[in-house]
Image (tube, rainbow, N blue to C red):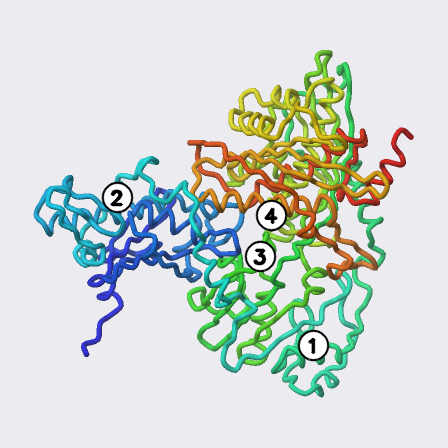
Amino acid sequence: MKSISRRDLLKGSFLIIAVSVTPLGTKLLSAKEVGKAVFAPNVWFELTPDNIVTVTIPNSEMGQGVRTALSMIVADELEADWSQIRVKQAPAADAYKNPVSGMQATVGSQSVRGFYAPLRKAGAAGRTMLITAAAQTWKVPEAECEAVKSAVKHKKSGRTLTYGELCRRASELPIPQDPPLKKESEFRYMGKPMARLDIPDKVAGSAVYGLDVNVPDMLYGVIARPPAYGAKPVSYDESAAMAVKGVSKVAKTPNGIAVIADSITAAWKGRDALKVNWDKGTHPDMNDESIEKSYMEGLDKPGALVVNTGDAKKALSEAAKKVEATYFVPFVAHVTMEPMNCTAYVQKDRCDIWVPTQGQTLTQMTAAGLTKLPLQKINVHTTLVGCGLGRRSRPDFVIDAVTCSQAVGKPVKVIWTREEDMKYDAYRASTCQRIQVSLDSRGSVTGWDHKVSCTSILRFLNPAGIKNGVDTYSLLGLHDNPVTPAFSHTTYEIPNWHIEQYLSDLPIPAAPWRSVGNAPNAFIMECFMDELAKAAGKDPVAFRLELLKNNVRARRVLETVAEKGGWGKPVPQGQGRGIAQHSCFGSYVAAVADISVNEKDGKITVHKITFAIDCGPVVNPDTLVAQAEGCAIMGLSTTLKEKVKFANGGVKSANFDDYPILKMSETPEIDVHIVKSTEKIGGIGEPPVTPIAPAIANALFNLTGVRIRRLPLDPKTVMEALNNKGA
């Protein structure tokens, strides 16, 4: 049998469309041109003679439906038969970096909004080429041919050729750089509910997550980690650990002391036998009380200037009425369904990593730094991800696996326990904020002074991103750097606006947590908007609309949710209704919450959440609704229950017995309304989290007259507020 090179195979047997995303725009390449190009293109789909279209997915699938959504975009513009669509996971490579962030990462609600335009163009180019190939085969004008579900038909004669029959001829054609895109009325899949491609394997149990990975000769690694921040090992019994049957190695790593064994049970026993004696760490007296005290004190310390528009000080001095409040939001854990894990095999000339990651680029860079291998020798095999929420954008668990494999020269699988996952998380950043606002005699805002004392997310993620003492990530929802793709600045038009930020030096690590800084900041902004409306003697919706005069999209979602959520209509006896709105990652969201509260024990029951969402064009409305529902549940959980507890310089919370989350029985009715929009496409995985907490807190105030300026709104906090009402 004659051998065939990979390049000849690509040239002769397939139709492959490659997309090069550059700062100068998008360029489409054929298989022939790929061979001649000096850069690696983004190859998004391939069509084979069996009529199968395989779409390559650069992002991590973690339940958000990205494999389906990106495939829908390609399939629709290609005019492919959905039953013949297949997907495969892309390797880690520059070619698959998202044009929004410049990284191959599934963060910032940017998967669909980043690849929407390039994939439409790639699919349309393929469709155009296949039509041309058919027209040339039949020797008829292209205008007489049309593509229909993976085939090209000659309208006059009724002749038909499948895409599979045409792919060889089409692969020899030049790729059109500006192919005609479909009109919305021509969409076959986009805008319609489509069943998820990843569900059948998950239901059948054949889906492979990080925890499912098995590699020949694989060992297991666990890490003995410090109980307090900055703690160092004083002593440990390596010989006792090595005496445990199955243990093959004890090694120091950047994150602690590794025990490597032939089973996870043996590794755990070996870790127990180490009996590590740790010193007290850098902040031995740190606990819940000292942490909150530190943030409160930060409000009175000099901060970095973030925004200074007009003269807020003058406006406050001339106010007819001043409103002031201080809010506090604690640290929140990610508690992903699948605890952190990673399998790595470091060899002399290559490194393979099997990992449920959100950050292929960072994984590759981290492993290259540890192994000193070139990036192209780091092979990242991305598995399905059992929940990410931003936690898996950090590479700490990758460091564990790579260093363990280096220590033994074999593949090693590192698995965190739930307790490790919670105690050694990088949390949603805590924030404390004081706001002073001036109102004139008509109840209109004339000046706004805002001080933020918070944890820096960038300090632990990318310290170089902190500019002039300002961490924009921690300010998302209040202020956003104009050049970032987060689009997370306030939607309100505020005159005489002043913001300062003080960054805490506490050692508690923070990381993006589903909406990054937007959810805590939206809680504070939207609750305070209700406080201002009351002080002005105005309806909360009307008050907001006054500050959104030129923001059509924000006004539209607010007005829509007010109508759909029954704002201004009678509330059922014993219930309260609250409203909030927010914008981030290119999308606009508003929510109404209907709640009741048991005044004997302080427990809040949320009966219904109503959403209005404008994210621009909608690819899969079924996924959009599912994402909104998931965001609502997470928002409810952090609003009513979640708070990381600290003691003795470290994390006290360890598992769900002392870190409660929302139960299925506590899930309310969730009603999602999609606001039709032709604006630029936005993200949907994170924005719906943001209005949940303030809508509930505002509903609680409207029901009881009690304003609580901290989270969570757990029964103890609510009862204390109710008992102190009027005091």
Residue identifier under label 1: 268
Judged from the image, the secondary structure of the residue bearing numbered disc 3 is loop
Residue that protrudes farthest toward the left in the picture:
139
Measured in 3D between alpha carbons, the distance from the residue under mark 3 to the one under mark 2, in whole angstroms, is 38 Å
Lower sequence index among marks 1 and 2: 2
Which callout, 3 or 2, points to the residue nearer the camera? Answer: 3
Residue 698: image quadrant is: top right
Q: Residue at x 72, y 40 (%)?
A: 502
Residue topped by disc 4? 514
Question: Can residue 438 be seen here?
Answer: yes
Left-right relation of 50 to 678? left
Residue 261 appears at what percent x and percent y?
Answer: 63, 81
**Secondary structure category for the residue under label 2:** loop
Task: Say few, some or many: other residues with alpha carbon within 10 Å of mark 4 (under 14 / 14 to 19 / 20 or more).
Answer: many
Question: Which residue is at the far right?
Answer: 727
Choose top left, top right, bottom left or bottom right for residue 230.
Answer: bottom right
Residue picked out by circle 3: 387
| Residue in the picture at 65% in, 38% down | 608
Q: Tell me which numbered mark, 3 or 4, is placed earlier along the sequence.
A: 3
Q: Mark 1 touching mark 3, by CB under 8 A?
A: no
Quadrant assignment for the N terminus: bottom left
Q: CA distance from mark 1 to mark 2?
A: 57 Å
Q: Nearer the viewer, mark 1 or mark 3?
A: 3
- Residue denoted by label 2: 177
Q: Which is more foreground, mark 3 or mark 4? A: 3
- Screen quadrant of the C terminus: top right
Q: CA distance from mark 3 to mark 4?
A: 11 Å
Task: Give the amino acid type for the residue marked by disc 4 in the picture.
Answer: Arg
Where does the image place residue 594, in percent across and percent down from the top left? 69, 35
In the image, what residue occupies the spot 23% across and 46% down? 147
> Against 645, is 699 above or below?
above
